Amino acid sequence: MDADVTDSAGTPADPDLPAGDTPQGRSQGRSQEEPGATDSKEEPEPGAVPENDAPQDSGDEGEAGAREDSEGDGGDGDQHGSDGKSAAGAQTWADHPKDGSASRRKRPWLRWAALGASFLVMISAGAGWWLYKKLDGNITTDTSAAAELKVYEKERPTPVVMDAQNILLIGSDSRSGDNREYGRDDGGSQRSDTTILLHLAADRKSATAVSLPRDLMVEVPKCRTGDDKETREQFTQFNSAFELGGTACTIRTVERLTGIRIDHHMVVDFNGFKDMVDAVDGVEICLKEPIDDKDARLELPAGRQTLNGEEALGYVRARKTLGDGSDTERMERQQRFLGALVNKMQSNGVLLNPTRLYPVLDAATKSLTTDPGLDSLRDLYDLVRSMRDVPTDQVQFLTVPRQPYRQNVNRDELVEPDASELFKQLREDKPVAVVPADELKEKEEEKEKAQDEKPDDAGSDSESPTPTPTYSGSSAADDLCEQ
């Protein structure tokens, strides 16, 4: 029988026919032990390091290799485990549970810490997603305005500076629903109580907000009504455009008036403004005289004080009992208050603190209707983030140059060429400057005096750099208590 094995498998010491090359050879290597193989394993070549004398930390691979060379697939290792090699090198599965159990007994807190951290991450991610979806769902998308603007695309201005943005902010004065407490309910019809053209410079180093008087006489183009009828083109007061044809009609009226392409629009109602003021814990103002305005539901003492949302709304809407009762003064008051609101949001770190920013975003989004380009929380966040580094003294507010309309002093008309110059600066993304009205008046008087004293043969103004156009207005850095 021994001869048969040798003839079929070859002599183990013969390198040309090593044992174990075939399944048959490996099986026979397990069934019997060849003397030649044993001799070759126990007599290493000169200078070689015996496997049994190798360092313990690398012995796993060496021992496995020695068993494969001498025993086929290592069947003898099961029979000779008593030599201690398998136990010392932890080569069997029986050794691992004992070692792992000892490790777990020594450091059980590591597992619990990992589980706790994973649980907190899951909870935080879930809460963050829920908050995001809640804010995102608050926003109302105005698809009808976008559809109508597409119909009149050929009439709209072409953008001049692509990275600059022009956003039309519309404050609705509807008295329906939650807003009925601020006046009579006229069946839900509405006019634009406040309209502001917000220009964001391409480099995002300045923001200019231009108020358009609601009583300004303008050309309102043909617009489609809610029942799909078309109004006639007419010369009328500005805020009637919103009543006739909604947001799209207002946008087209502003574009025709200014030549500026409107990129986005937002419509905000009264309650949104109130809630935003409450979300930043009120805004501080100073009053030279007390206010008692029953129409605005406002009664305030003179002096420095912080207004909550309800008081702030009455303050920016009051008209008849403050100053000369004009809409122009009310717009200036609105601009200063908005500047103070922006200043507080930046100075208190609201825009950089997610915990404080959330209530502001929640209040804003609940009352916000916008075009599809700004109807997600991500879009609004990107817009706010692009503005948060704008210096407060470069967040400027002004009213388009206007004067009483010649045929009706209760209406307004543009002052030219000042208005056209302002629109050109914004359209081309060039800077404008604002100063208080009294300071602007002094500058204009000084300019006129210098022109009168200038010799007739003096060089023309074209030889000197063109000065930045200056208008009456304010900035977010202004202190309302120093007005």
Image: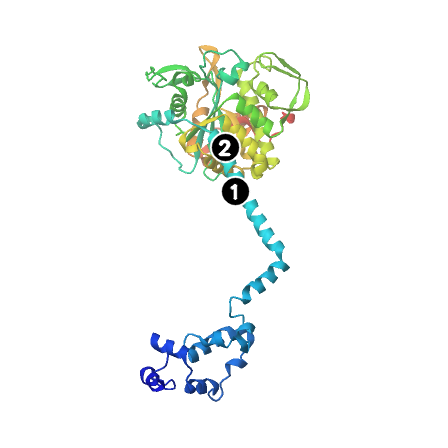
Question: Which one is nearer the viewer's eye here, 337 or 16?
Answer: 16
N-terminal label among 1 and 2: 1
Give the percent coordinates (x, y) of residue 239: 44, 17
Give the percent coordinates (x, y) of residue 49: 51, 83
Q: Is residue 138 visible from the viewing direction of this image?
A: yes
Residue at left offset 57%, top offset 52%: 114
The answer to whether residue 412 is above or below residue 483 is: above
Give the percent coordinates (x, y) of residue 155: 32, 26
The answer to whether residue 475 is above or below residue 173 is: below
Q: On the rendered image, what quadrant is the C terminus found in?
A: top right
Counting every numbered tag in the picture gives: 2
Q: Provide the secondary structure element on which disc 1 rests.
A: helix
Q: Provide the secondary structure element on which disc 2 rests.
A: helix
The answer to whether residue 180 is above or below residue 426 is: above
Asked whether, in this view, residue 328 is left or right of residue 109, the answer is left
- Determine crowd level at label 2: few under 14, some 14-19, many 20+ residues with C-alpha closer than 10 A: some
Q: On the rendered image, what quadrant is the N terminus found in?
A: bottom left
Asked whether, in this view, residue 130 is left or right of residue 101, the answer is left
Residue at which label 2 appears: 134
**Cβ–Cβ below 8 Å for labels 1 and 2?**
no
